[in-house]
Image: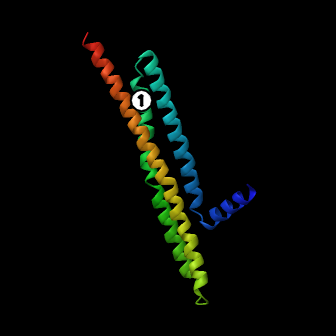
C-alpha cells in the first residue's frame, strides 16, 4: 500500500502546479454528485413507499447541483490541457541541446495533467448524466401522480 501511495505522490508531483486544482475539483465534483445521487435515491424510495410528492424546491436544488457538476466537469480537461501546454513550454525552455531525454521527460510529465483532467472529467460527466436522468424520472413520476390526482 505504501508503494502505491509513493508512486501516486510522485506522479501527482510530476504533473505540476495544476494538479492541485484538478484534485480539488475532483473532490468537489465527486462529493457533490454522489450526494445528489444518494439524495435522489432517498427521495425516490420515499416516493415509492408513501407516494408523497417531493417538494419542488428540493428537486430544483438537486437539479442546480447537477447542472453545476456538468459545467465544472467540462472544465477538468481544459485544466489538464493548460497543464500540458505549461509543461511543454517549460520543457522546451529548459532544453539545452544536451539530449532528447530531458525533452521527452518534460513532455511526459506535461501529459500527466491531460490524463488527470480526463480521469476527473469522464467519470464526473457520467455521474452527472446518470443523476440528471434519475431526476428527470422522478419529476415525470411526480407529474404523473399529480395528473392522476387531478383527474379524480
Q: How many labels does the image show?
A: 1
> Would you name the residue on which mark 1 appears?
59
Q: Toward which corner of the image does residue 129 lie, by quadrant?
A: top left
Residue in the image at 43% along x and 41% along y: 130
- Mark 1 lies on a secondary structure that is helix
78 above or below 49?
below
Q: Toward which corner of the image does residue 101 lie, by quadrant?
A: bottom right
Q: Where is residue 75 in the image (x, y as percent from the top left)?
A: 45, 55
Q: Where is residue 44 in the image (x, y as percent from the top left)?
A: 45, 26
Q: Position of residue 36 (x, y in %)?
A: 49, 35
The quarter of the image holding the N terminus is: bottom right
Furthest-bottom residue in this view: 97
Residue in the image at 44% along x and 32% along y: 61
Residue in the image at 61% along x and 90% along y: 98
Q: Position of residue 110 (x, y in %)?
A: 55, 70
Residue density around tag 1, few if under 14, some if 14–19, many if 20 or more, within 10 Å? some
Q: Toward which corner of the image does residue 11 lie, by quadrant?
A: bottom right
Q: Is residue 119 left or right of residue 132?
A: right
Amino acid at each position: 500500500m505504501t508503494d502505491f501511495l509513493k508512486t501516486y505522490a510522485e506522479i501527482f508531483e510530476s504533473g505540476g502546479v495544476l494538479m492541485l486544482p484538478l484534485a480539488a475539483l475532483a473532490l468537489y465534483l465527486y462529493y457533490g454528485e454522489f450526494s445528489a445521487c444518494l439524495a435522489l435515491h432517498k427521495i425516490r424510495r420515499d416516493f415509492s413507499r408513501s407516494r408523497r410528492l417531493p417538494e419542488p424546491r428540493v428537486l430544483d436544488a438537486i437539479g442546480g447541483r447537477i447542472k453545476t457538476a456538468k459545467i465544472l466537469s467540462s472544465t477538468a480537461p481544459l485544466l489538464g490541457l493548460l497543464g500540458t501546454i505549461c509543461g511543454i513550454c517549460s520543457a522546451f525552455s529548459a532544453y539545452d541541446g544536451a539530449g532528447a531525454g530531458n525533452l521527452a521527460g518534460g513532455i511526459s510529465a506535461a501529459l500527466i495533467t491531460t490524463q488527470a483532467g480526463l480521469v476527473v472529467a469522464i467519470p464526473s460527466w457520467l455521474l452527472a448524466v446518470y443523476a440528471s436522468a434519475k431526476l428527470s424520472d422522478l419529476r415525470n413520476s411526480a407529474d404523473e401522480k399529480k395528473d392522476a390526482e387531478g383527474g379524480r
